[in-house]
Amino acid sequence: MSETVGAVTQNVKPSTRSLEDMPLEPSADIKKVWGKVHSDMRQEFGEAVFRSWLKPLTLQAYYHGTMEVSVPTRFMRDWIQNHYAERISAICSECNAEIKCVQIVVVQNAILDDVVETQKAADAPNADTDNADEKLRAAIEEVSSPLDQRFTFDSFVVGKPNALAHAAARRVVESNKIPFNPLFFYGGVGLGKTHLMHAIAHMVKEQEPEKIVMYLSAEKFMYQFVRALRANDTMNFKEKFRSVDVLMIDDIQFIAGKESTQEEFFHTFNALVDQNKQIIISADRAPGDLNGLDERLRSRLSWGLVADIHPTTYELRLGILQSKREQAGATVPDSVLEFLALKVTSNIRELEGALNRIIAHADVTKQEVTLESTQDVLQDLLRAHDRRITIDEIQRKVAEHYNLRLTDMHSSRRARQVARPRQVAMYLAKLLTARSLPEIGRKFGGRDHTTVMHAIRKVEELIDADAQIAQDVEVVRRALTG
Ligand code: ADP
Ligand code: MG
C-alpha cells in the first residue's frame, strides 16, 4: 500500500521513520495552516468522525511541500489512509497551495520503542509478528466473556420457532466465505439467542483455532469502552476490537440511548465489515424496533440476515425436556414432561429450571418423580403461570366492557368510540403483561410502537382527568386480575 497520499503520490516513503532522518520542526506558518486544516476537517467530516479519527492526527514536520502528520497506531494510519486521506490532502492544498502531499506516519508516544519495534518487525517479520499476534490475542481473550460449555449445537434442540436462527448459525460455521453480515438474532428472553452464539463460537474455535473470536455482551462492550475513554486509551481499544475475526455482541438493546458507545460500536462494525469479518448480534427485538438506537446503526444492523426466534411451541418444549432429561440421566415419566411442556410456556430457561427442580427434589427425597410430586414441587411456579394474562384476554374483556366487537381492537377505525377503548386495552396490555411496546403494537393490528406509547400516555392522562375513564379501566383491570 502506498504510504503517501495527496496530489503528488510518486513520493512514496516508509511510514515509520528512523530517528536519524527526523525532519525539522514545522514553521509557525505551517502550524497555523494545520490549525485551519484541523477545523476544516471537523466541519467536513462531522464531530463524530473527527473525534474518533482525525483529532489524534498530530503535525510532526514539514519539508519540501510534504506535510507529515502522525497517528499512534498502524491500524489508525491504515484506516485514515483508506477513508479520509484523499480529502485531507485536498483540504491541505486548499489552505496552502504550497502543500503538495500529506504523509501519515505512526508515532507512538514512546517513539524510540516504536522505531525499534518496527525495525525489528521489518528484519524478522515472522518471529515478531507472531509475538505481537499472541499478545493481541491474549488481550482480546481478556475482553471476551467466557463461553458456556453446555451451549453447543449438539445440545440445541431445533423446532419450528428457532429453525431459521439455527440454520443461519450453521451457515456461518459451515461456509467458506461470510454468508451474511451481520447475522442478527432476535427474540424474547430465554429463547436461545445466547446459546446459539456460544455454539457458533465453540464451533469456529474448534474448526479454525487460529481465528480470533470475541464474544461479549453489549453491556461489557460499553464498560470496556468507557474504561478506555477514562484511561485515555481508546486507540488500544479500537485496535483490539478491529483485530478480531468474529465479533459477537449479545443483547445489543442495552446500548440504546448510550450515544458514544453506539458511535464507537458503529465504527467498529463498519471497520470489521470492511475487512470482511463476521459480525453476529443479538437483541430482544428487531433492528427496526430498537428505540434509542441511531438510525444509521439500525439500518446497518439489518443489512445481513435478520433471524427471529419465536416463542416456543408445545412440540419444541417437549423436545427440549426430553433432551434435557437424557443429558441429566434422570428418570422422569413422559407424563411429567408433557405436563411441564403444557404448563411452563414462558421461555426455555424457566422450563429448564422447572425440570431441574423436580429432578433435584427427587434426588434429595429419594422418591420417584410423579405428576403429583411435580405439581407439589412447582406449586408457586404453576400458580404464577395460571395467572398470566394475555393480550387476547385483555382485548376480549375491553371489547366486552365497551360493547364492541373484538375486531375493533385490530381495525384501523379511528372513531373515538372505538379508538378510546383500543387505547385502554393497549394501556392494560402494558400494565398487566410483560410484552414490549412493539409486541403490543403488533397485537393491535400491526400498529407502531409509538402509537402504543401515545395510547399509554393518553390513558394515563385521562385516568387523572376523567373519572369515568378511571372507573372503566379499574373495572376491566379487576375483571382480568381478580
Ligand atoms: P436468551 O439468550 O435468548 O435469553 P439463552 O440462550 O440464555 O436465552 O437460553 C436460555 C436457556 O435455555 C439456556 O440454558 C439454553 O441452553 C436453553 N435453550 C434455549 N434454547 C434451547 C434449545 N433450542 N435447545 C436446548 N436448550 C435451549
Ligand atoms: Mg442471552
Image (cartoon, rainbow, N blue to C red):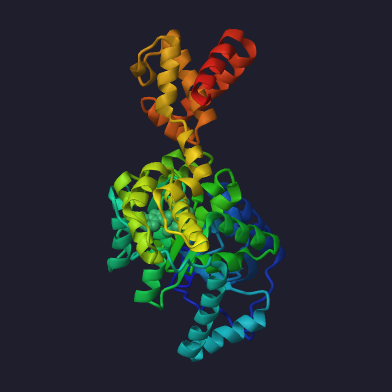
Q: Nearer the viewer, residue 315 or 146?
A: 315
Residue 17 point in image, percent of width and height: 58, 80
Q: Residue furthest right?
A: 28
Residue 44 point in image, percent of width and height: 54, 48
Residue 255 visible (yes or no): yes
The quadrant the N terminus occupies is bottom left
Please give left or right for residue 164 compared with residue 70 in the image: left
Q: Nearer the viewer, residue 302 or 120?
A: 302
In this picture, is 190 found above or below 436? below
Please give left or right for residue 358 compared with residue 33 in the image: left
**Which residue is rendered at x = 36% and y = 55% of the image?**
321
Name which quarter of the figure residue 188 lies in: top left
Name which quarter of the figure residue 32 lies in: bottom right
Residue 196 point in image, percent of width and height: 39, 59
Q: Nearer the viewer, residue 323 or 310?
A: 323
Q: Nearer the viewer, residue 316 or 282?
A: 316
**Which residue is rendered at x = 58% and y = 59% of the image?**
220
In this picture, is 205 found above or below 194? below
Residue 7 point in image, percent of width and height: 46, 63
